[in-house]
Image (spheres, grey):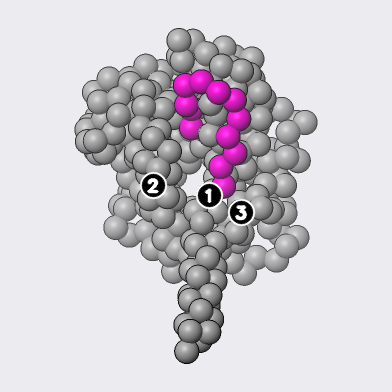
């Protein structure tokens, strides 16, 4: 009887470990010592998107570099993807006592930073948003209504059914459009191609559905926005950011000249200099 109980306990523990592995929402690599910084990558990217920045920041800070589930080598999780990512980050911050950390987020990662800062109990030191908006859906979809965004739609089904060749063509076009530095196009493309296809489709649906334009009025944490000016031009970019962030009570914004979406690749020196200024 005792042996049976031991075997049963072993089975339960094994199943529990397996379940935890399946629900792991991200991988984190910690580098350096000092004041904590959480670095969130953009959609499909791994934490390596911050590699050059972390090399410098980690000399004086403890950098927690994230890669989200379904991207890089981190196994995919079941949808809803984005809310689980946020819940996992909340838990990680609590467990590691990182409530006063600085958050630096690119694209999706910047939107996540805003989402975390909305919590009335949030006590982060600062949020640095790198080319990210409170509502990507409102920018991309005419007559945007969050309630109409669903997983099961013709566009998503086409992406799920797309063959490898056509998906690679699309990835190439996206990488080219988001970065002026041609040497980095293959890196961005590789991240897109490696992403779990369902995460790519349904995770992006989660992002499009998320609308923080009104909730950001609750934020009381210092927010700095670093915005790319290309390919739309500085005037158009300023108009977009002014409209999207109009409910945020106080923030500062700086524009990266001659940079597309991946500022860390197009203007790495400017980005590092600006981040260091904000940290001081």
The residue beneath circle 1 is 26
Relative placement, left or right, of 63 versus 174 is: left
Report helix, strand or loop for mark 3: loop
Residue at 30% x, 25% y: name it. 221
Question: Residue 116 location, x and y as percent?
Answer: 34, 38
Residue at 56% x, 42% y: name it. 28
Residue at 54% x, 71% y: name it. 14
Relative placement, left or right, of 184 versus 255 is: right
Distance (Cα) linking label 2 and label 3: 18 Å
Q: Is residue 13 magenta?
A: no
Label 2 crowding class (10 Å Cα cut-off): few <14, some 14-19, many 20+?
Answer: few
- Magenta range: 27-38
Can the viewer see residue 129 in this picture?
A: no
The residue beneath circle 3 is 74
The residue beneath circle 2 is 91
Asked if the residue at tag 3 contacts the one at tag 1, i.e. Cβ–Cβ closer than 8 Å, the answer is: yes
Q: Nearer the viewer, residue 244 or 17?
A: 17
- Report how many numbered discs are placed on residues in the image: 3
Judged by depth in the image, the label closer to the viewer, 2 or 3, is 2
Question: Residue 30 location, x and y as percent?
Answer: 58, 34
Magenta stretch, main secondary structure, is strand
């Amino acid at each position: 009887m005792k042996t049976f109980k031991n075997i049963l306990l072993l089975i339960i523990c094994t199943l529990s470990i397996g379940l935890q592995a399946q629900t792991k929402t991200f991988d984190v690599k910690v580098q350096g010592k000092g004041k904590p910084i959480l670095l969130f990558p953009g959609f499909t990217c791994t934490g390596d998107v911050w590699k050059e920045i972390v090399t410098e920041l980690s000399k004086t800070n403890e950098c927690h570099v994230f890669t989200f589930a379904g991207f890089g080598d981190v196994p995919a999780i079941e949808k809803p993807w984005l809310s689980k990512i946020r819940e996992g980050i909340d838990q990680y911050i609590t467990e590691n006592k990182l409530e006063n950390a600085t958050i630096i987020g690119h694209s999706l990662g910047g939107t996540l930073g805003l989402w975390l800062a909305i919590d009335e109990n949030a006590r982060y030191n600062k949020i640095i948003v790198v080319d990210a908006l409170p509502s990507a859906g409102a920018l991309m979809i005419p007559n945007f209504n969050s309630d109409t965004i669903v997983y099961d739609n013709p566009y998503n089904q086409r992406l799920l059914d797309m063959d490898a060749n056509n998906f690679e063509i699309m990835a190439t076009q996206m990488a080219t459009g988001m970065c002026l530095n041609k040497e980095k196009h293959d890196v961005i493309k590789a991240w897109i191609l490696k992403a779990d296809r369902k995460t790519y489709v349904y995770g992006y649906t989660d992002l499009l559905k998320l609308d923080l334009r009104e909730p950001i009025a609750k934020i009381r944490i210092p927010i700095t926005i670093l915005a790319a000016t290309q390919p739309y031009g500085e005037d158009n970019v300023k108009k977009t950011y002014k409209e999207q962030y109009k409910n945020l009570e106080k923030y500062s914004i700086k524009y990266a000249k001659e940079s597309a979406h991946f500022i860390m690749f197009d203007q790495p020196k400017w980005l590092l200099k600006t981040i260091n200024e904000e940290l001081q």
